[in-house]
């Protein structure tokens, strides 16, 4: 159901009429357009040559030309808006929701430098920054290890404020072992990193500056002031008439009326400009419109240089490795640790520390045995679609049902009727930057969850983060609030339902992708996700640590080695080992 257009009184009445009924009204307009289309065809005779005239009918060409004329309208140009404008468009949060929102926003508040607009030479330079290993003493498995970081600027002077976005891992290449470290910002240019010691051997520190504090301030500005820097569009069509207009979570009113696609169940807002000729109910599909350009001033863009200040290693002022001895008998494992990771890699396999016994599902028959009788519902972005694809690729008995879905969009479904396995994937609702999603297939995860019976044979997997990176965090909080409510309802109906949530992961960044997909944005959303699902009976799959601890370069879509570890973890939860065994 859609609610039509602000400022057009007769829309509601018109909507109840069928398209056929009022189309005749547009016949003169249509004829005019057809004529202008013909003129357009003749005028653009050169571009015609590239068309395949033999197969396309004249009428089809005519229709195409009409679309081309309409597509050039100013409707498709991104428009300026800011979040204070958008805020009143969505539903008002209740007092309790506002309290939680404030708490969450405070918990992810990022330190700001006292002076904004520092020139490049005074900004953080990873090449001149360094770390030192704190007097390690005798290191043993089960203990921890501390590294001090001193950030410096391009002039080689110590930084006086915090806010640099640093990540760290400790690893032993020969053992294919790795673990994430925890970075603490002292807000004076110094940082401390804590590493847990989980295996014996020579361990090496790897410290990376993802962005300088100066760059983070720019990303923060973009998030508030340019939340439409990724924009969307929808195709509207009725008969031979079609139009494309701009869509987003919120749109300034300008002169054009809006189509209001606010979800009646959740109140999640979504708008498109109303097409000139067509009704709001004629929306066919949704797609990514594009990415805005020229977002940065010349000064700001200096903070985003590949090879200079995006994802650059920080080196040690002395040694970069230490030797860890096996645990002595007296030492109790895990005591006094400042930071407990969710797991680590050893011999290339993820070893969770959450208590679950990790099993290796290394063949189609083991996976099939595990999934026997299960219904697995996957919802979200392409990072969970990868899991669906992994299972399809590794279990030949799972036959994909062909929905004629657009490539990489879905929805997808696969069935193994011999073993009674159902596997489904569906993308989350807007904002979604997919190439083309049919409007009829744009469903919100929370509404989907409300349609599940649940039970011990139902597995729900959710991954929703990447497409929210360009919006103020409030937008993500609202979305998660709706999903969390639906998860609670589901677990209340059927407490035996297994719900897994995949967290955000790190990715490859260059100056442009940083504007839209920076790990800094992901990390902010991820912190919110973890806080909002804390204490609920859901299992987090820590994609953040699994990509940070691994030796592979960061990628939005992690490579197969990481995916197989994620799936082994997921399957280990679906088919847990009953008898408590010692972990290998
Ligand atoms: C944001 O939009 C509101 C409402 O249109 C306007 O009053 C305000 O000045 C804008 N703020 C910025 C920073 O552009
Ligand atoms: C850009 O940087 C230069 C050099 O540091 C400075 O003189 C200028 O004022 C800056 N421009 C803006 C708009 O901040
Ligand atoms: C930061 O660390 C460096 C090197 O360890 C030290 O010399 C300096 O005093 C520290 N600065 C502050 C403000 O603590
Ligand atoms: C859009 O529709 C929703 C729900 O019907 C309504 O609450 C909201 O005020 C509408 N927004 C605008 C801008 O018309
Ligand atoms: C550890 O560091 C020392 C001193 O920098 C170096 O000589 C040695 O090769 C390193 N060992 C490994 C295994 O990287
Ligand atoms: C799968 O792993 C088990 C032990 O975890 C091993 O015995 C078996 O050979 C492996 N199978 C394949 C096909 O790799
Ligand atoms: C939208 O739907 C139309 C008609 O089905 C299709 O031709 C088009 O490729 C789809 N995608 C976009 C981005 O318009």
Image: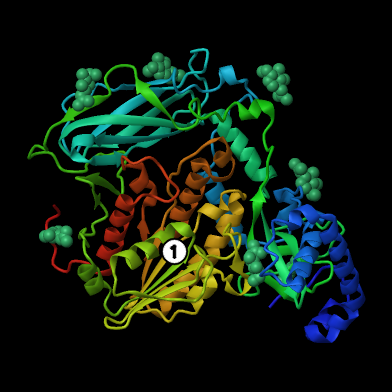
In the rendered image, the vertical position of residue 528 relative to residue 485, given as above or below: above
Question: What residue do we see at 17% from left, 28% from top?
Answer: 323
Residue 167, x across and y down, in percent: 40, 35
Q: Residue 302: which quarter of the image?
A: top right
Q: Is residue 373 left or right of residue 75?
A: left
Q: Residue furthest front?
A: 54
Residue 97, x across and y down, in percent: 58, 60
Q: Is residue 469 left or right of residue 3?
A: left
Question: Which quarter is ligand 3 in?
Answer: top left
Question: What residue do we see at 48% from left, 13% from top?
Answer: 156
In the rendered image, the vertical position of residue 16 relative to residue 310, given as above or below: below
Q: Nearer the viewer, residue 432 or 202?
A: 432
At mark 1, the secondary structure is strand
Residue 313, x across and y down, in percent: 40, 27
Is the distance from the Cβ of mark 1 to the nearest ligand 4 atom less than 8 Å? no
* Residue with the mark numbered 1: 462
Q: Nearer the viewer, residue 230 or 335?
A: 230
Question: What residue do we see at 57% from left, 53% from top?
Answer: 468
The quadrant of the rendering that contains the N terminus is: bottom right
- From where the camera sits, is residue 269 visible? no
How packed mark 1 is, by other alpha carbons closer than 10 Å (few <14, some 14-19, many 20 or more), is: many
Q: How many marks?
A: 1
Residue 518, x across and y down, in percent: 52, 42
């Amino acid at each position: 159901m859609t609610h039509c257009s602000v400022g057009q009184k007769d829309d509601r009445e018109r909507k109840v009429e069928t398209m056929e009924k009022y189309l005749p009204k547009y016949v003169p307009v249509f004829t005019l357009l057809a004529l202008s289309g013909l003129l357009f065809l003749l005028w653009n005779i050169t571009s015609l040559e590239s068309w395949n005239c033999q197969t396309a009918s004249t009428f089809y060409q005519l229709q195409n030309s009409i679309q081309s004329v309409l597509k050039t309208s100013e409707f498709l140009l991104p428009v300026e808006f800011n979040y204070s404008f958008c805020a009143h468009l969505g539903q008002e949060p209740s007092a309790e929701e506002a309290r939680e929102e404030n708490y969450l926003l405070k918990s992810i508040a990022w330190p700001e430098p006292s002076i904004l607009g520092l020139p490049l030479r005074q900004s953080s330079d990873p090449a001149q920054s360094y770390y030192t290993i704190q007097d390690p003493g005798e290191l043993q498995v089960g203990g921890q290890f501390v590294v001090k970081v001193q950030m410096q600027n391009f002039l080689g002077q110590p930084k006086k404020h915090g806010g640099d976005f640093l990540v760290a891992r400790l690893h032993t290449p020969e053992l294919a072992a790795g673990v994430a470290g925890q970075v603490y910002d002292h807000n004076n240019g110094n940082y401390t990193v804590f590493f847990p010691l989980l295996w014996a051997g020579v361990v090496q520190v790897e410290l990376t500056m993802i962005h300088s504090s100066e760059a983070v301030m720019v990303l923060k500005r973009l998030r508030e002031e340019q939340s439409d820097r990724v924009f969307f569009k929808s195709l509207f069509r009725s008969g031979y008439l079609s139009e494309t207009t701009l869509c987003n979570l919120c749109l300034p009113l300008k002169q054009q009326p809006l189509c209001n696609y606010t979800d009646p169940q959740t109140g999640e807002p979504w708008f498109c400009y109303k097409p000139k000729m067509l009704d709001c109910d004629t929306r066919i599909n949704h797609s990514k419109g594009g990415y805005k350009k020229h977002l940065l001033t010349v000064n700001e863009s200096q903070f985003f240089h590949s090879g200079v200040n995006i994802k650059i290693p920080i080196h040690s002022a002395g040694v970069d490795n230490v030797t860890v001895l096996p645990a002595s008998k007296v030492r109790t494992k895990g005591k006094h640790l400042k930071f407990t990771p969710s797991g680590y890699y050893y011999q290339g396999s993820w070893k969770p520390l959450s208590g679950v016994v990790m099993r290796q599902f290394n063949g189609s028959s083991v996976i099939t045995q595990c999934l026997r009788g299960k219904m697995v519902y996957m919802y979200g972005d392409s990072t969970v679609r990868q899991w669906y694809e992994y299972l399809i690729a590794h279990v030949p008995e799972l036959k994909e049902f062909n929905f004629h879905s657009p490539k990489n969009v879905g929805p997808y479904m696969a069935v193994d009727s011999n073993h009674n396995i159902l596997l489904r994937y569906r993308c989350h609702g807007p904002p979604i930057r997919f190439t083309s999603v049919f409007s009829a297939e744009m469903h919100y995860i929370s509404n989907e969850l409300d349609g599940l019976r649940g039970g011990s044979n139902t597995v729900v997997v959710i991954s929703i983060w990447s497409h929210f990176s360009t919006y103020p965090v409030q937008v993500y909080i609202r979305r998660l609030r709706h999903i969390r409510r639906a998860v609670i309802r589901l677990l209340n109906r059927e407490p035996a339902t297994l719900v897994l949530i995949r967290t955000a992961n790190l990715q490859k960044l260059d100056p442009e992708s940083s504007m839209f997909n920076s790990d800094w944005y992901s990390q902010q959303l991820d912190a919110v996700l973890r806080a909002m699902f804390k204490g609920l009976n859901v299992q987090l799959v820590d994609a953040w640590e699994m990509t940070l601890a691994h030796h592979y370069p960061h990628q939005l879509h992690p490579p197969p080695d990481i995916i197989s570890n994620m799936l082994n973890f997921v399957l280990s939860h679906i088919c847990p080992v009953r008898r408590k065994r010692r972990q290998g």
